[in-house]
């Protein structure tokens, strides 16, 4: 997604004191050196939450982070951002790729300088990373399919897709579409390629709903950017109806932001997959600190309730839990969206 302008967005970063105690927590020693954190964009409440958690987690784990860099939805700018940080002498990088293929150039630049990289949220197609911190995005698509399949049974549903240049967009789309074709063949899926952009989602849904006013369900691959334009579009067509009432359109999303939880309570959103923004920040700092100290990682169960799996090309991914949220558990205090 593209925000306003092409500029570096400085996050509010807690400056760690350069005292001996701080050095012992990772500010110096074998894991010493500064870490650069590269965001894909800041137009989504999900990424805003992750951005806010980075300095807190860095402070808690003794990692010295520079102000975060916002690549503003531009894959070419993201490579330039990575190169700029390498030129500034960072000893570690935490990168959330915009484009799974394009980011490989940045990974190669880091490898040439022996700078370890942790990827967050999106896996690269190839290249050297110490770890990918991510949840199972295929499970997102399957969970959305299951909820919509049970509710709709027959008719048309809309899938507002993410960027298919991203592993996330591809994984969510393929899993949802395959699940629908296999388990709910009486449901026809209509796709809107929105590329993580709210305006494209709004325009696409406006045109599609006007041509198909009997749609029964919608899958939002990114609630952080697609929820608001979706609800506004349905409201404009007098089609925003609470759950349990006639003509309700079942909506399932991904992210778990506070706005989605609020919409579930209101009855306008039926479910969301809570993508763990807080854990992304926590384990990004966990892995980059250890990678900078020379530690390597292996597939298997972790000590924090997840599993490290091996992706094609030997890339390791810590597959963090991402629970489905419905009216039954929307008030669970463990959900990160309830702590904002």
Image (cartoon, helix red, strand yellow):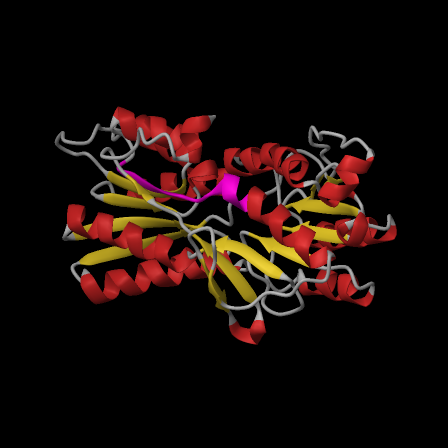
Residue 299, how many percent across, how many down? 50, 68
Name the one closer to the observer, 127 or 216: 127
Above or below, 35 against 185 in this view is above
Q: Is residue 275 left or right of residue 47?
A: left
Residue 266, how many percent across, how many down? 27, 24
Q: Is residue 124 left or right of residue 20?
A: left
Q: Can residue 96 be seen in this snapshot?
A: no
Q: Residue at x 54, y 58 (%)?
A: 166
- Residue occupying the far bottom of the picture: 313
What is the count of numbered marks?
A: 0
Residue 7, how many percent across, how many down? 75, 37
The part of the chain drawn in magenta is 270-280
Q: Is residue 153 left or right of residue 173?
A: left
Residue 118, how many percent across, how many down? 64, 56
Q: Can residue 118 be seen in this snapshot?
A: yes
Name the one closer to the observer, 303 or 122: 303
Above or below, 106 against 238 in this view is below
Instruction: Tell me if residue 275 is in the magenta stretch.
Output: yes
Q: Residue at x 68, y 51 (%)?
A: 289
Question: On the image, which quarter does residue 23 sit in?
Answer: top right
Above or below, 258 against 47 in this view is above
Q: Residue at x 69, y 45 (%)?
A: 37
């Amino acid at each position: 997604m593209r925000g306003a302008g092409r500029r570096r967005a400085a996050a509010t970063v807690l400056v760690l004191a350069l005292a001996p105690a701080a050095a012992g927590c990772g500010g110096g020693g074998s894991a010493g050196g500064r870490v650069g954190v590269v965001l894909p964009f800041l137009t989504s409440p999900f990424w805003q939450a992750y951005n806010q958690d980075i300095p807190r987690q860095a402070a808690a784990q003794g990692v010295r982070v520079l102000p975060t860099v916002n690549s503003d939805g531009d894959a070419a700018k993201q490579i330039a951002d990575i190169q700029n940080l390498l030129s500034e002498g960072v000893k570690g990088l935490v990168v959330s790729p915009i484009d799974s293929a394009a980011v490989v150039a940045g990974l190669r630049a880091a490898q040439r300088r022996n700078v370890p990289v942790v990827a967050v949220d999106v896996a690269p197609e190839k290249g050297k990373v110490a770890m990918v911190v991510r949840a199972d995005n295929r499970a997102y698509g399957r969970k959305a399919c299951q909820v919509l399949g049970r509710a709709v049974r027959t008719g048309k549903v809309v899938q507002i897709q993410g960027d298919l240049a991203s592993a996330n967009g591809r994984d969510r789309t393929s899993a949802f579409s395959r699940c629908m074709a296999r388990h709910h063949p009486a449901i026809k899926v209509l796709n809107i390629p929105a590329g993580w952009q709210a305006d494209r989602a709004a325009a696409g849904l406006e045109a599609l709903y006007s041509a198909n006013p009997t749609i029964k369900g919608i899958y939002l691959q990114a609630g952080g950017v697609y929820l608001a334009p979706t609800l506004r579009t349905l409201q404009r067509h007098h089609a925003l109806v609470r759950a349990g009432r006639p003509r309700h359109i079942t909506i399932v999303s991904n992210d778990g932001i506070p706005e989605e939880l609020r919409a579930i309570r209101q009855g306008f959103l039926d479910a969301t997959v809570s993508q763990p923004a807080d854990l992304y920040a926590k384990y990004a700092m966990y892995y980059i600190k250890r990678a900078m100290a020379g530690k390597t990682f292996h597939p298997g169960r972790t000590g924090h309730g997840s599993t490290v799996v091996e992706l094609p090309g030997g890339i390791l991914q810590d597959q963090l839990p991402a629970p489905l949220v419905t009216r039954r558990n929307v008030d669970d205090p463990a959900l990160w969206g309830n702590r904002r």
